[in-house]
Amino acid sequence: MDDKYPIISILGIRFNLANCLSVLVSAVLVFALVFFLSRKIALKPTKRQNVLEWIIDFTNGIVKGAMPGEEGKQFYLFTFVMFMFIFISNQLGLILQIKVHGVTWLKSPTANPIITMSLAMIVLVLAHYFGVERLGFGNYMKSYIKPVGFFLPINIIEQFTNFLTLSLRLYGNIFAGEVLLSLLVKMAFSHGPATMLVTAPLQMIWQGFSVFIGAIQAYVFVTLSMVYISEKIEMED
Amino acid sequence: MFSNLIVGASEAYLGDSLFVLVVFIILVALVGKFAFGPVSKMMQDRSDKITNDLDNAARSREDAAKLAAQRATELKNSKSEAVEIVNAAKQNGEKQREGMVKLAQEEVQTLKQNAKKDIEQSRLDALNSARDDVAQLSIEIASKLIKKELSVTDQKSLINSYIEGLDKQNEIR
């Protein structure tokens, strides 16, 4: 909204350092968590390994839901990382928001449309790449005029709507959650201890709900990603 | 349309997208190498092991059932075999007994016959010897009587008769 961001320009490419830092922190957190969970892997799983295997089973299940066959296996790792990254990113802003002199340095990276669009772009580029790889370029192009020729404009528009809905849904949910959180914080500090007492439970409730939303949105994002990819790599008849 | 949608970001930052892409690729690589790969492999190994174990269990159960059936038939066979053996032994015993009885009877028969023959023989012998003795005795008695009061005539006639007797005896012989 009215936030200020630290922006630098390298070789004419502009970087929003807040986004970059948030993405980096999320990635490091994801790796640290997963690395921590994956120590001492054994045939008889320990507690940590059980947690990790449960998450992996969960994301594998998402892939299997869209692509039940052998072709889904190559997306297990991608789905797992994407889910973990978005989930941690969604939760990051609930725990940690750093502002220095009014300039935001750290928040949920998914509360920024650029980040979510980048993620959606990764998904769609993968979808189209695997579509061409699997079906061949001719069949890939033919898939735009299916089931009949005049669907061509609709099919082309669909690619953009897929991209926009995928990215903006995630962005909107997380961004709205953070806006409400910061509004509650402002309200808490507006009239001294009285408003603090009132807003503390509200804040707690909304934070809990945001955790829930963050998890749901991560799930929705990877589920739709897999649906889009499966649409591209499966021959429709 | 885009500028309205993108709230809070006055301009698109290409650098952010590139950064996200790079970080994401590195994250995928690292997670794949250090966590996802080994854990997935372990999960695969485990499912393989469980499948194998289940197969093995089914196979050994089958084997056990087969073995039990085999043992049962063998037991039955051995029972019938035992019955057969006992029956054979009984028959053999019966046969042997009959044979022995028959043998004993035959022996008894022969013994009886021999005894009869012996008795007959000895009876005949005794009779013969008795007859001889009687003849001898009568001859002795007769000679004594004859010595005492045999007249010449009588002697002659006696001699004649005796000779006749001898002749007859010769004739008979």
Image (cartoon, rainbow, N blue to C red):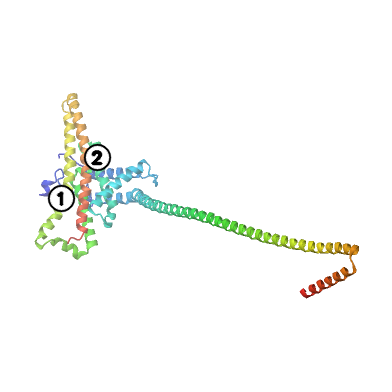
Using the image, determine if residue A2 lies above or below residue B124: above
The location of residue A99, given as percent across then percent down, is 22, 37
Neighbourhood count class around disc 1 (C-alpha, 10 Å): few under 14, some 14–19, many 20 upward: some
Q: Assess whether mark 2 and mark 1 are in contact (beta carbons under 8 angstroms).
A: no
Q: Quadrant of residue A182?
A: top left
- Front residue of A112/A167: it is A167
Of callouts 1 and 2, which one flags the residue occurring earlier in the amino acid sequence? 2
Quadrant where the image shows the C terminus of chain A: bottom left
Q: Residue A164 carries which label?
A: 1
Q: Mark 1 lies on which chain?
A: A
Which class describes the residues within 10 Å of circle 2: few (<14), some (14-19), or many (20+)? many
Q: Residue at left 86%, top 63%?
A: B140
Q: Is mark 1 on a helix, strand or loop?
A: helix
In the displayed structure, does residue B119 sit left or right of residue A20?
A: right
- Amino acid type indicated by mark 2: Gln
- Residue identified by numbered label 2: A91
Above or below — where is A218 with respect to A185? below
The answer to whether residue B47 is above or below residue A146 is: above
Residue A147 at what x, y percent from top left? 13, 61
**Residue B165 visible from this viewpoint:** yes
Disc 2 chain ID = A
**Disc 1 marks which amino acid?**
Leu
> Which residue appears at 32% of the width and 42% of the height?
A51
Tell me whether marks 1 and 2 sit on the same chain: yes
